Image: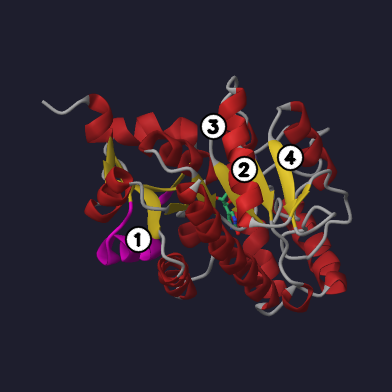
Amino acid sequence: MRSAAESHLQPSDEVAEALATGAPLVALESTIISHGLPQPRNLEVARELEEIVRAAGAVPATIAVLDGVARIGLSEVELERVASESGLRKLGQRDLPVASALKASGATTVSATSFLAARAGIRVFATGGLGGVHRGWTEEQDESADLDTLARTRITVVCAGVKSILDVPATLQRLETRGVTVAGYRTDTFPGFYLNSSGLPVEWRIESPEDAAAIMRGQDAFGGDESALIVANPVPVDQQLDPALHDRVLAEALDAAARDGVTGQAITPFLLGYLVRGTSGASLEANLAAVRGNTALAAQISLAWSRS
Ligand code: PSU
Ligand code: MN
């Protein structure tokens, strides 16, 4: 009989082989595909990200839950399903047991993807921007489960900081309080997701994938809490969204969300979608530039990690 964990968590053949041989792997999330990017561009991007990982010599593992099974590495047909199935759910870590019990399908957020990747034995994960503390948290306490999962999951997440739709200073404060290690990649300021910089300082700066791998070894050597490492990798200045346009359209988006009463899981996709339309697609290009850069860096870190 298969163990409970085995039947709930299913690596693809390619991922299983990479895990068995210690080959470098990069986990990729699926919520960005299903809820974060418009169709049909989302499928192209999902394929492109996998290709970036392969070109660097690592194995991609896009993660999603299909018919109740957490799949670590998707086939082309499964990737298409994640990109186009209507009504696909957005699953955080807490939703995983329910999706499994009810044989539901859904895309995994940073929290669910980090959790599943770590359980599967994958150490490095690339995404766009993390979730965090939403603006207006003094009125309505909306804080992404991403933060809590990262405080207790041994994973390295390469991201362009946290989404700029959030209260970035409050999110950085929460990461500090929860003991999540943060390092800026070749930057002294925390990235601003669509923007090269949030304007806030980042206390540690690293220069290479080897630096990241050395920090990961340090995390394991110290033992203790299974917290994450965030490698904050800014979108290049020449590919960022125009800051004035960003600030103007984001203010409109936040007003629209308040007016329409958008809350909970729907708020992040709503704001990202508003920005895409309100900037005539410029925010999408900046988001994609960030995700591509993060994926390439994650692949380099996974190579350095597998050599270390
Ligand atoms: N990065 C992107 N686009 C996205 C996301 C990340 O560039 O859509 C997703 C991630 O899955 C992240 C989620 O976990 O947004 C955060 O959602 P929430 O604020 O509801 O926790
Ligand atoms: Mn939320």
Q: On the rendered image, what quadrant is the N terminus found in?
A: top left
- Label 1 sits on what residue type? Glu
Residue 121 or residue 1, whichever sits in front: 121
Whether the residues at callouts 4 and 3 have beta carbons within 8 Å, the answer is: no
Residue 88 or residue 163, whichever sits in front: 163
Q: Which residue is mark 4?
A: 133
Q: Which residue is mark 3?
A: 153
Label 3, residues with CA under 10 Å away: few <14, some 14-19, many ≥20: many
Disc 4 to disc 2, C-alpha distance:
29 Å
Under tag 3, what secondary structure?
loop
Residue 137 or residue 237, whichever sits in front: 237
Q: Earlier in the sequence, mark 1 or mark 4?
A: 1
Residue 140 magenta-drawn?
A: no
Whether residue 236 is visible, yes or no, is yes
Q: Can you tell which of label 4 and label 3 is closer to the viewer?
A: 3
Residue 88 magenta-drawn?
A: yes
Q: Which residue is mark 2?
A: 214
Q: Which region of the structure is painted magenta?
A: 73-89
Residue 169 image position (x, y, % from top left): 84, 43
Q: How many badges with numbers are in the image?
A: 4
What residue appears at the point 77 percent right and 57 percent down from the top-left corner? 191
Q: Is residue 92 above or below residue 298?
A: above
Q: Earlier in the sequence, mark 1 or mark 3?
A: 1
Q: Which residue is mark 1?
A: 85
- Label 2 sits on what residue type? Ala
- Label 4 sits on what residue type? Val
Q: Can you tell which of label 3 and label 2 is closer to the viewer?
A: 2
Disc 3 to disc 2, C-alpha distance:
18 Å
Whether residue 146 is visible, yes or no, is no
- Label 3 sits on what residue type? Thr
